[in-house]
Amino acid sequence: MYLKLRPATNRDRKAVEDMVFGVLAEYGLKPDPSTTDCDLQDIELSYLTRGGMFDVLVDETGRVVGSVGLFVISPTICELRKMYLAAPARGLGFGRQMLEHALGRARELGFARVVLETASVLREAIALYERYGFRRYTPEHLSARCDAAYFLDLLPTPSIQPKER
């Protein structure tokens, strides 16, 4: 399966929303376009203008089959948001690739910590996050459909130092 990750624009809004809402429905979760999912109404303003990122995974026809975003919380903290894969793209390593891409971009953008909220029914996603070192914590507030929160402190990418003689 050929899939390509590329930056999203507001032209992708409807396709992203359809894909995200479809995945939520598969897991028995309700979309909430007025609060939790209102960031999809203007992807560029919600993510890009604020200094974050939002990318989509598209198939050879251009159909959106995945998404991942970094939403700015503070100058040092971003939230991993809207990381979803449509059913045909699951189990093929694309979730891992999207997460590695997002964590790399978070480092490039200067964030020291990545947080996320999720629902426990998304077991595959939680297992992936935990494999990458995300640790559970209790935030002050959780989105309505979420019952778990995780964080990952990003270590600086080690630079290669020349050996001393």
Image (cartoon, rainbow, N blue to C red):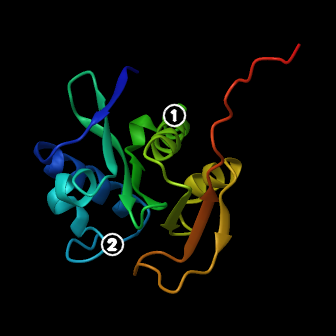
Q: Quadrant of the C terminus?
A: top right
Q: Residues within 10 Å of mark 2 (few under 14, many from 20)?
A: some
From the viewer's perspective, tell me whether residue 70 is left or right of residue 111. Answer: left
From the viewer's perspective, tell me whether residue 21 is left or right of residue 110. Answer: left
Amino acid on which the number 2 mark rests in the picture? Lys
From the viewer's perspective, tell me whether residue 67 is left or right of residue 8. Answer: right
Q: Quadrant of the N terminus?
A: top left
Q: Earlier in the sequence, mark 2 or mark 1?
A: 2
Cα–Cα gap, marks 2 and 1 = 26 Å
Q: Compare residues 99 and 18 and report the one nearer the observer.
A: 99
Residue drawn at x 27%, y 67% is 37
Q: Position of residue 133 (x, y in %)?
A: 70, 53
Residue drawn at x 27%, y 58% is 50
Q: Compare residues 98 and 110 and report the one nearer the observer.
A: 110
Q: How many marks?
A: 2
* Secondary structure beneath label 1: helix
Provide the residue designation for mark 2.
Answer: 30
Residue drawn at x 33%, y 47% is 53
Above or below residue 12? Residue 165 is above
Label at residue 113: none
Question: Quick check: marks 2 and 1 in contact, CB under 8 Å?
Answer: no
Provide the residue designation for mark 1.
Answer: 97
Q: Residues within 10 Å of mark 1 (few under 14, many from 20)?
A: few
Q: Compare residues 149 and 76 and report the one nearer the observer.
A: 76
Q: Position of residue 131 (x, y in %)?
A: 70, 48
* Secondary structure beneath label 2: loop
The image quadrant of residue 63 is top left
The image quadrant of residue 31 is bottom left
Q: Position of residue 51 (x, y in %)?
A: 31, 52
Q: Compare residues 87 and 146 and report the one nearer the observer.
A: 146
Amino acid on which the number 1 mark rests in the picture? Gln
The image quadrant of residue 164 is top right
